[in-house]
Amino acid sequence: MRIDLEDGLRRLGYESFRPGQREAIETLMSVGRVLLVAPTGGGKSLAYQLPAVCLPGTTLVISPLVALMNDQVQALAARGVSATFLASTLDGAEVRRRMARLAQGDYRLV
Protein backbone atom coordinates (compact mmCIF):
# COMPACT_ATOMS: atom_id res chain seq x y z
CA MET A 1 0.00 0.00 0.00
CA ARG A 2 1.40 3.39 -1.01
CA ILE A 3 0.92 6.17 1.53
CA ASP A 4 0.85 9.78 0.31
CA LEU A 5 2.48 11.68 3.17
CA GLU A 6 2.17 14.99 1.33
CA ASP A 7 -1.60 14.56 1.01
CA GLY A 8 -1.89 13.71 4.70
CA LEU A 9 0.28 16.70 5.56
CA ARG A 10 -2.05 19.03 3.63
CA ARG A 11 -5.12 17.41 5.20
CA LEU A 12 -3.75 18.36 8.61
CA GLY A 13 -3.17 21.93 7.44
CA TYR A 14 0.60 21.93 6.92
CA GLU A 15 2.59 22.79 3.81
CA SER A 16 5.93 21.21 4.66
CA PHE A 17 7.74 19.03 7.16
CA ARG A 18 10.03 20.38 9.84
CA PRO A 19 13.54 18.94 10.07
CA GLY A 20 13.41 15.28 11.10
CA GLN A 21 9.63 14.88 10.86
CA ARG A 22 9.45 13.07 7.51
CA GLU A 23 12.23 10.69 8.51
CA ALA A 24 10.57 9.92 11.85
CA ILE A 25 7.18 9.31 10.22
CA GLU A 26 8.63 7.12 7.47
CA THR A 27 10.50 5.07 10.09
CA LEU A 28 7.38 4.72 12.22
CA MET A 29 5.32 3.59 9.26
CA SER A 30 7.89 1.09 7.99
CA VAL A 31 9.36 -0.26 11.24
CA GLY A 32 6.42 0.29 13.58
CA ARG A 33 8.24 2.32 16.20
CA VAL A 34 10.41 5.41 16.45
CA LEU A 35 11.95 7.67 19.06
CA LEU A 36 11.59 11.34 18.18
CA VAL A 37 13.22 13.84 20.50
CA ALA A 38 12.30 17.44 19.70
CA PRO A 39 11.74 20.64 21.67
CA THR A 40 8.35 22.02 22.63
CA GLY A 41 6.75 23.21 19.42
CA GLY A 42 9.10 21.03 17.39
CA GLY A 43 6.35 19.09 15.65
CA LYS A 44 6.22 15.83 17.61
CA SER A 45 2.43 15.56 17.38
CA LEU A 46 2.59 15.24 13.60
CA ALA A 47 4.62 12.03 14.05
CA TYR A 48 1.49 10.22 15.24
CA GLN A 49 -1.25 12.37 13.70
CA LEU A 50 -0.06 11.94 10.11
CA PRO A 51 0.15 8.12 10.20
CA ALA A 52 -3.25 8.09 11.93
CA VAL A 53 -4.92 9.90 9.02
CA CYS A 54 -3.02 7.90 6.38
CA LEU A 55 -3.51 4.39 7.76
CA PRO A 56 -6.69 2.46 8.55
CA GLY A 57 -7.83 1.88 12.12
CA THR A 58 -7.53 3.84 15.34
CA THR A 59 -4.30 5.25 16.74
CA LEU A 60 -3.93 5.31 20.54
CA VAL A 61 -1.84 8.15 21.98
CA ILE A 62 -0.83 8.29 25.66
CA SER A 63 -0.45 11.79 27.10
CA PRO A 64 -0.33 13.01 30.70
CA LEU A 65 -1.67 16.47 29.85
CA VAL A 66 -5.47 16.82 29.63
CA ALA A 67 -5.23 20.37 28.25
CA LEU A 68 -2.94 19.18 25.44
CA MET A 69 -5.26 16.27 24.63
CA ASN A 70 -8.25 18.62 24.47
CA ASP A 71 -6.42 21.16 22.29
CA GLN A 72 -5.26 18.47 19.86
CA VAL A 73 -8.71 16.86 19.62
CA GLN A 74 -10.24 20.26 18.82
CA ALA A 75 -7.57 21.03 16.21
CA LEU A 76 -8.04 17.62 14.57
CA ALA A 77 -11.84 18.05 14.54
CA ALA A 78 -11.38 21.39 12.77
CA ARG A 79 -9.52 19.46 10.05
CA GLY A 80 -12.23 16.80 9.77
CA VAL A 81 -10.32 14.11 11.69
CA SER A 82 -12.46 12.19 14.18
CA ALA A 83 -10.66 12.14 17.53
CA THR A 84 -11.40 12.04 21.23
CA PHE A 85 -9.64 11.74 24.56
CA LEU A 86 -10.30 9.83 27.76
CA ALA A 87 -9.37 11.34 31.11
CA SER A 88 -10.35 11.25 34.75
CA THR A 89 -11.86 14.72 34.31
CA LEU A 90 -14.76 13.24 32.30
CA ASP A 91 -17.85 11.92 34.07
CA GLY A 92 -18.72 8.23 33.79
CA ALA A 93 -21.52 8.71 31.26
CA GLU A 94 -19.23 10.64 28.92
CA VAL A 95 -16.50 8.00 29.20
CA ARG A 96 -19.04 5.26 28.35
CA ARG A 97 -20.32 7.26 25.37
CA ARG A 98 -16.81 7.77 24.02
CA MET A 99 -15.87 4.12 24.64
CA ALA A 100 -18.98 2.97 22.74
CA ARG A 101 -18.03 5.16 19.79
CA LEU A 102 -14.46 3.86 19.99
CA ALA A 103 -15.77 0.28 19.86
CA GLN A 104 -17.75 1.22 16.73
CA GLY A 105 -14.58 2.50 15.06
CA ASP A 106 -15.73 6.13 15.01
CA TYR A 107 -12.36 7.62 15.99
CA ARG A 108 -9.07 7.83 14.09
CA LEU A 109 -7.19 9.01 17.19
CA VAL A 110 -7.80 8.47 20.89
Image (tube, rainbow, N blue to C red):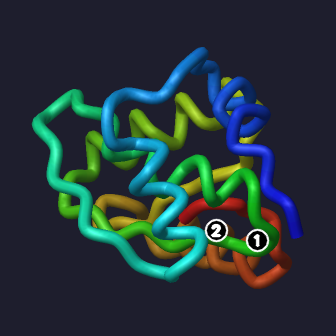
Residue situated in front as seen by the camera: 94 or 15: 15
The N terminus, quarter of image: bottom right
Label pair 2/1, CB-CB below 8 angstroms: yes
Residue situated in front as seen by the camera: 61 or 99: 61
Tag 2 secondary structure:
helix
Q: Position of residue 22 (x, y in %)?
A: 48, 44
The image shows residue 77, relative to residue 93, as above or below, that is: above
Tag 1 secondary structure:
helix
Q: Tag count in the figure?
A: 2
Per the image, the residue denoted by label 1 is 101
Residue situated in front as seen by the camera: 2 or 37: 2
Q: Position of residue 69 (x, y in %)?
A: 37, 48
Whole-number angstrom distance, CA of label 2 to CA of label 1: 5 Å
Residue situated in front as seen by the camera: 106 or 24: 24
Q: Residue furthest left?
A: 39
Q: Position of residue 60 (x, y in %)?
A: 51, 73
Per the image, the residue denoted by label 2 is 98
The image shows residue 81, relative to residue 32, as above or below, that is: above
Q: Residue at point 74% right, 29% down? A: 11
Q: Left or right: where does residue 96 sit relative to residue 61?
A: right
Q: Residue at point 43% right, 51% down? A: 23
Q: Mark 1, residues whose alpha carbon is within 10 Å: few (<14), some, or many (≥20)?
A: few
Q: Position of residue 30 (x, y in %)?
A: 58, 75
